[in-house]
Image (cartoon, grey):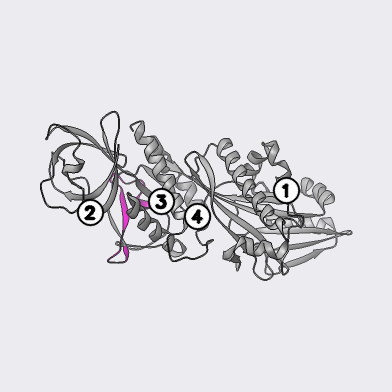
Amino acid sequence: MGLQCKLIIEQLETDFPCLYISKELFIINQEGSLFPFYFGNDLEYVRMFQFTGNSSSPLILYQTKRYSSMTFPCINLKITPGKSLHAGPVIGVVTDCKQKDEYGLSLGVMDTFCKEFSQWVETCGGLLFLIHLKDLDQSRLRGYSYNDDQKMWLPSIIPLPAILYNRIHSRKKDREAQISLESFTKNGVIVFNQSFLSKMEVYDQLFSSASLHRYLPYTNRFTFSELKEKIGVYGDLFIKHKAGSQGRNLIRIRKIASSFSIVQNSFSTERKINCSNWNEVEELLDKWCRPRSAYLIQETIPLSTYQGQSIDFRFLCHFIRNEWKVTSTVARISGKDEFVSNLSRGGRIEKPLVLLSSLFKGNQVLETYKRMKELAIASCETLYNKSHLSFGELGIDIGIDHLGNPWVIEINSKPSKQNYHETNGIRPSVKALYQVCKQKWLERSDGEI
C-alpha cells in the first residue's frame, strides 16, 4: 500500500508520541493503539488517532520529543505486510563542504545540484538532509534542510536516514569517514557510493570480464622495470596516481628514437622536459612519483581530437529498478595545452552528437554513440557485480579513436555535478538519483528494518 501526504512534526516533551492521521489515510481500526512507525530508519512506537482539524490535503501530525518542529509538503507512506508504517524516503547526503557558521553551509559547485535535489525530493515525496561529516558520530544526528524562504540550509536534529549518499569531496576525509559510514550500515542504513575508487582496482575488475578486454588500454602498477619494458612496446605511456582526480598528477612519456619527451601537469613549473637517455628519465620520475606504489602506468591510446584538443565523453549512469541506465551524456573538450578534458582544468562541454558529427559522417555518428553507451552500461554492470562496494551512480569516461572504437578511460564513484547542460528545469540525473533512493527505500521497507 502506498500513499502520499503532508507531514507536520510538532516537538513536544511527551513520553507518549502520537500520530494524528487524516481520515482518508487512517489505517487502523482502534484509535489509541500502539503502532510501529519508521521515520527513515528511526523506529518509534506511537499511538495513532484520527486527525480532526481542518486540512485541504491529507496529512500526518507527528508529535514527538525526538525532532525539531518541521513541516514537509509531501512524503511517501508505506504500510508493510508486518503492519508497520514507514515514512520516507529520508535521504542523507554526506558532505565535507565548508560550514560558514552555526547556521549555514557553503556548498560551492555542489550548491545548485543540492538545491535541485532537495526541490525534486520535496515534489515527489520524501525528505532530504545534508549531513556534514563532522556530525556523523553525534549521538543525535544533526542535518540541514533547505529553507526556500530564507534561501539557506538550516540545521536541525533529524531522523536516521534510510539512505545515505556519500558526496565527500576529499579523498583523505573520505577515508577518515569510512568507520562512521560502516556504523550506519550496521544500523540498517543503505549507504551507496560509500568511497572513492582506485584506478588499478577498477582496471582489474573490468579486465576480469573477457568481453571488455578490447576496450581497455593496457594498465599496470608502476615500477621502473615495467615502465622501461612497456615504453619499448607502446612508445607512449601515461603515468597516473592511482587515486588521482580532476586531471591532476598526470605524466605522459614518449620515446622518440633514443631520447624521451615528458609532459606533466602537476610536478614542475616546466611543463615539457626532454631526456636524452633512460637514466635521466628515472632520475626525474624518482623525484615525482613517491611512493611508486601509489602510481600506475597506462598505454596511451591515439584518441580522436577536436581542433587539436583532447576530447572524451562522460556518461552518467544510475542503477534503477535493478538495471543500469544512462541518464545523461556530455562531450568534454580540453583547455588549451591540456591533455585532460576536466572542467576544473579549463575544459568545456558540448552536446555529444554535435561533436561526433564533426568527427564522423552519416550513420557512423549514431553508431559510435550507441557503442559508447553500450560500453558504459557494460562497465557499470561489471563493476557493480565484481566490487564489494555498493553503487547507485557512476560516471564513465570514454574516448574514441579515429575509427570510432570506444575506450574506457576512467570510472568515477563521485562524478562531478558540473558536467551537465543547463536547463530551466530539474536535470535528468537529479530525477534519476531520486529514483535510486526511493527504490532502495521501498526494497528495504518491504523486508522491515
Q: Please indicate whether residue 4 sits to the left or right of residue 320 in the image.
A: left
Q: Is there CB contact under 8 Å for labels 3 and 2?
A: no
Residue picked out by circle 4: 170
Task: Give the Cα separation between the discs numbered 1 and 2.
Answer: 53 Å
Among the 4 quarters of the image, the one containing residue 22: top left
Q: Which residue in the protein does label 1 denote? A: 217
Dot in front, 3 or 2: 2
Q: Amino acid at mark 1?
A: Pro
Q: Can you tell which of label 1 and label 4 is closer to the viewer?
A: 1
Q: Position of residue 340 (x, y in %)?
A: 65, 62
Q: Residues within 10 Å of mark 2 (few under 14, many from 20)?
A: few
Comparing labels 1 and 3, the label whose residue is closer to the camera: 1
Mark 1 or mark 3: name the one nearer the start of the chain.
3
Q: Amino acid at mark 4?
A: Ser
Across and down, in percent, residue 393 comes to: 50, 48
Question: Do we see residue 339 in this rendering?
Answer: no
The mark nearer the N terminus, 4 or 2, is 2
- Numbered circle sitting on residue 94: 3
Question: Which amino acid type is shown beneath numbered disc 3?
Answer: Val
The one of 412 and 183 positioned closer to us in this rendering: 412
Q: CA distance from mark 3 to mark 2?
A: 21 Å
Q: What residue do we see at 18% from left, 39% from top? A: 26
Estimate the spatial distance between the alpha carbons at disc 4 and disc 3, rounded to whole Å.
12 Å
The residue identified by callout 2 is 70
Looking at the picture, does residue 49 appear above or below residue 423? above
Q: Secondary structure at mark 1?
A: loop
- Report helix, strand or loop for mark 2: strand
Residue at image coords 73%, 68%: 308
- Mark 1–mark 4 Cα distance, whole angstroms, equals 27 Å
Q: Are marks 4 and 3 in contact (CB under 8 Å)?
A: no
Residue bounds of the magenta highlight = 130-152
Q: Position of residue 418 (x, y in %)?
A: 51, 62
